Amino acid sequence: MSKNTLVDVKNLSVHFPVHGGIFSKRVATVKAVDGINFSIDRKQIVGMVGESGCGKTTVGRAMINILRHVAPDVEIGGSIEYHFGDEVVDFARLSSSEVRKYRSRVQMIFQDPYASLNPRMTVAQIISEPLQLHTNMTNKEQTERVGWLLDKVGLQPEQARRYPHEFSGGQRQRVGIARALATNPDLIICDEPVSALDVSIQAQVINLMMDLQDEFDVSYLFIAHDLSVVEHISDKIAVMYLGDMAEYGNAQDVYHQPRHPYSKALLSAVPLPDPSRKNRKRIVLEGDVPTPLNKPSGCAFRTRCPIAQPACAESKPEFKEQAKDHFVACPIVE
Amino acid sequence: MPEQQEISLSILKKRWLKFKTLKRGYYSFVLLVILYILSWFLPLLVNNRALVLSYEDEMYFPIISGYYAGSEFGQDVPGETIYRELQATWESENSENWVIMPIYPYSPFEDITVAGNKMYDPPSNTHWLGTDNTGRDVFARLCYAFNISISFALVLTILNYIIGVIIGGSMGYFGGRFDLFFQRIIEIWSSLPMLFVIIIISSIIRPSFFLLIFIYTIVNWIGMTYLMRAEFYREKSKDYVAAALSMGQTNFKVMFKHILPNAMVPIITFFPFAIVGGISALVSLDYLGFGMPPPTPSWGQMLDVGLQNITKAWMVFAPISALFSTLIMVVFIGEAVREAFDPKVYSRLR
Ligand SMILES: Nc1ncnc2c1ncn2[C@@H]1O[C@H](COP(=O)(O)OP(=O)(O)OP(=O)(O)O)[C@@H](O)[C@H]1O
Ligand code: SF4
Ligand SMILES: [Mg+2]
């Protein structure tokens, strides 16, 4: 762990109990996240990729401590240690009232720009809400700050009086970005911030986010399901599969020398303009993703892995540093 | 009409503008509001006590100060002054003294014990809608009953809404054991035959306005509670709530500042129908004789005596048409509100 570490996620697991029957007995467990490790440094961008349902959003929500809101009985294991100055706080352990004072340090940009802005509030009200909660600004200062932020994200300050339904998806996402930046956070969790937008707008929004990252010195956990998006912008890449982390390492290493069979399959599906890699073999995965309700024993990927061995069913593969800063959860490829 | 809007409108404001274009509902709304506001000034408009009276160069305000014996103004009657007669006498005598009466100089409580009043007086210039079986003026009673009916329905509905938002909102928002507990209570509660419970209670205790409100609230809170539970449950999982929480907003603020404004649709669209329900509830209880204590003016009681004297058409006709026109206006409002809240543009049955 370097001095620059902002957050250190150790052995994080998130299990949702499933209840059934007349006495609401616990009948099963959704293992949405099942013991993952990674860390984010200051001013770093970590990309997280994986198929739908593999637990990316759950990781992000755990990291801002709002899982208990929708699922009060969720079981969170491991730790999410933030290093704010000299303080070390574990978001996995804090109650929702204890966490409140650190809320301004970690923010989130949501996937769906239509649901993430309250339709009854004007843009000014939406962006000034975090200012009211975390600063002592007067109304006038808040208005100024809102105008300044809107300008930063490429909107006109005059649009502050408008309601979300008067904006396009891309513009709304810009409002969401302005809201997340309002309190100068250390980390922003970007949960597929562009996947709901038109392809033509995606690049604009990503470029904007990169510029702002530079300007505000903020770290991003950038969640996406498309490796090619993540590769360009990330310093590190984490590949998730069914609640486990398959591979984690520097973006170049993971992208150009993937080790885990799942990462390889993901990469082979990325359409590449690069002719030097034209003749790579496309790996098509067989079968469907198993549900996190009933994960396969041992390696979760073994039901679809092209190189699976009988031993893979026995124990969960160790998440091991196979090369420098390159962690892989597969002993077979070591 | 494509128009450039300088200031952008909140959704609610847009709906209000839409509502205003739906003439039938909008005019019913305006008329009902005006009538209801006027009905609070009924003691000044429909009353048997004089507004102002000047007797031997001194001013009296019986409508405020209350009872004056007839003898005080030189009138030879037992008990309270009959101001109408006083006015007639003084006018015919060209006296210095004068009386100003309310526009409609009869009270809803004034019966045959007051000289000059007759039972079953058919409609005329003096008694616009005639008098009833005890000689009380039907028009006066109708007006006062309007105020009571609407007030009853309003207080009942608002109370139910407050309970519904607080309990139902918390059920939906917090979920878990709290939700389960109230769900079971509601299930048990809603299986009780409530009309009988009310009849039993009001045959034991003498009912009053607030007791009836209380009893009906105990029955009616369930409906709004269930609606609000569903609304809050749906809204709480939306990302704007997660965003508010992730910036450190308290649950209380999230519930009332963020979610409640987004849960207004059932609150507003349901309101007119809740009012209809409230009015009808009071009428049926009064009709059965378990409602407001006599001699409170009420449409239900008037309907009851009217039907007992079915040959006196005015006694039946008056409460029925009052009830009918009030309810239909509220229904028009409800229809227009529903229309204004409908996201589809062309869905009106014409
Ligand atoms: N509150 C909850 N209760 C029970 N199960 C849940 C809950 N939230 C998420 N899950 C389950 O956890 C798993 C991971 O969900 P998550 O939303 O994190 O996936 P994701 O990787 O973000 O997928 P997507 O790409 O579709 O956004 C899913 O199987 C989901 O059904
Ligand atoms: S551990 Fe076995 S099944 Fe899992 S990825 Fe490696 S080879 Fe495939
Ligand atoms: Mg997701």
Image (tube, rainbow, N blue to C red):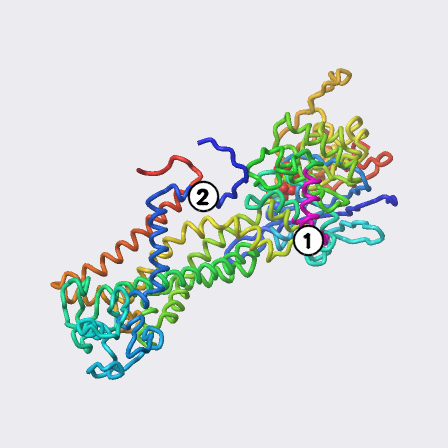
- Pointer 1 residue: A133
Q: Give the x, y percent position of residue A146.
A: 68, 43
Which amino acid lies under the numbered mark 2 shown in the image of this protein? Arg
Quarter of the render that holds ligand 3: top right
Disc 2 chain ID:
B
Numbered badge on residue B15: 2
Q: Position of residue B289 (x, y in %)?
A: 26, 70
Tell which of B72 and B248 is nearer to you: B72
State which region is magenta. Answer: A129-150
Is disc 2 on the same chain as disc 1?
A: no
Residue name at image x 15 percent, y 62 percent: B124
The part of the image, by quadrant, that contains residue A45 is top right
Q: Helix, strand, or loop for circle 2?
A: helix
Q: Is residue A53 visible?
A: no
Give the percent coordinates (x, y) of residue B2: 47, 31
Image point (87%, 35%), residue name: A324
Q: Main secondary structure of the magenta part?
A: helix
Image quadrant assignment for residue B82: bottom left
Left or right: residue A163 compared with residue B336: right
Q: Dot 2, how many residues are within 10 Å of its Cα: few (below 14), some (14-19), or many (20+)?
A: some
- Position of residue B38 relative to residue B77, above or below, is above
Quarter holding the N terminus of chain B is top left
